[in-house]
Amino acid sequence: MLWAIAVLIGATTVVNATNLTHAKNESALQVTTGDKYAILVQSTKNLRASIMTGSEMKQANPALTFEIVIMGQMVQELNDKELRPILDGANKAGIKLVVCEFALQVYGVDLQDLPAYFVGTPNAHKYMFQLNEKQYNTLSI
């Protein structure tokens, strides 16, 4: 009986130490060491999440570069009144907002009708390849 209790206490100690190690590793994953990031988004939901992520990263390291490249049908939503404060906040946080001019053309949106902080690129996919060549950490969601 004493042997069983000793084994149980020993196992619990190992599990607790392992959980503590995992907790330390998980928090370490929140630290970024790069200085150039870009995310390609195609939905408003992912745009909002990307802005949140970029804002957190810029707050932790104002010197880093963070770009959100927007493409697809969601370009039609960029003038939505509910989305405007979020986009303005991204701009204020120092996040560069790049929009695919091909998508704008396909969905009948004029770059001139978007806030002045939007930057156009002829082709979002090609732009992402160029960012990769410039050593950006990129993600497509």
Image: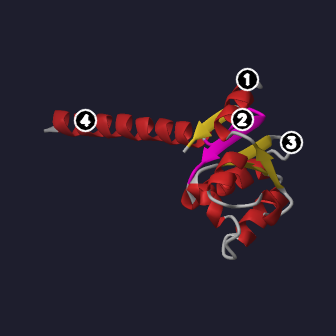
Displayed quadrant of residue 13 = top left
Residue, far left? 1
Q: Earlier in the sequence, mark 3 or mark 1?
A: 3
Residue 120 - label: none
Which of the two residues, 100 or 44, is positioned nearer the viewer here?
A: 100
Amino acid type assigned to the residue bearing label 4 in the image: Ala
Residue at the spot x=80%, y=41% of the render? 65
The mark lying in front, picked from 2 and 3, is 2
Q: Residues within 10 Å of mark 4 (few under 14, many from 20)?
A: few
Tell me if label 1 and label 4 are in contact, CB under 8 Å. no
Note whether residue 60 is visible: no
Whole-number angstrom distance, CA of label 1 to CA of label 4: 57 Å
Question: Residue 133 shows which numbered tag?
Answer: 1
Viewer-proximal residue among 1 and 28: 28
Query: To which residue does mark 4 refer?
Result: 6
Choose the circle earlier in sequence order: 4 or 3: 4
Q: Secondary structure at mark 1?
A: helix
Q: Amino acid at mark 1?
A: Glu
Q: Residue furthest bottom?
A: 81
| Inter-mark Cα distance, 4 to 2 | 61 Å
Q: Compute the Cα span from label 2 to label 1.
A: 10 Å
Residue to which mark 2 is pinned: 127
Q: How is the image coloured?
A: secondary structure
Q: Is residue 131 magenta?
A: no
Residue linked to disc 3: 63
Of label 1 and label 4, which has the lower sequence position?
4
Mark 4 or 2: the one toward you:
2
Q: In the displayed structure, would residue 103 be above or below residue 138?
A: below
Q: Nearer the viewer, mark 1 or mark 4?
A: 1
Q: Mark 2 belongs to which amino acid?
A: Tyr
Q: CA distance from mark 2 to mark 3?
A: 22 Å
Q: Which span is picked out in magenta?
A: 30-42
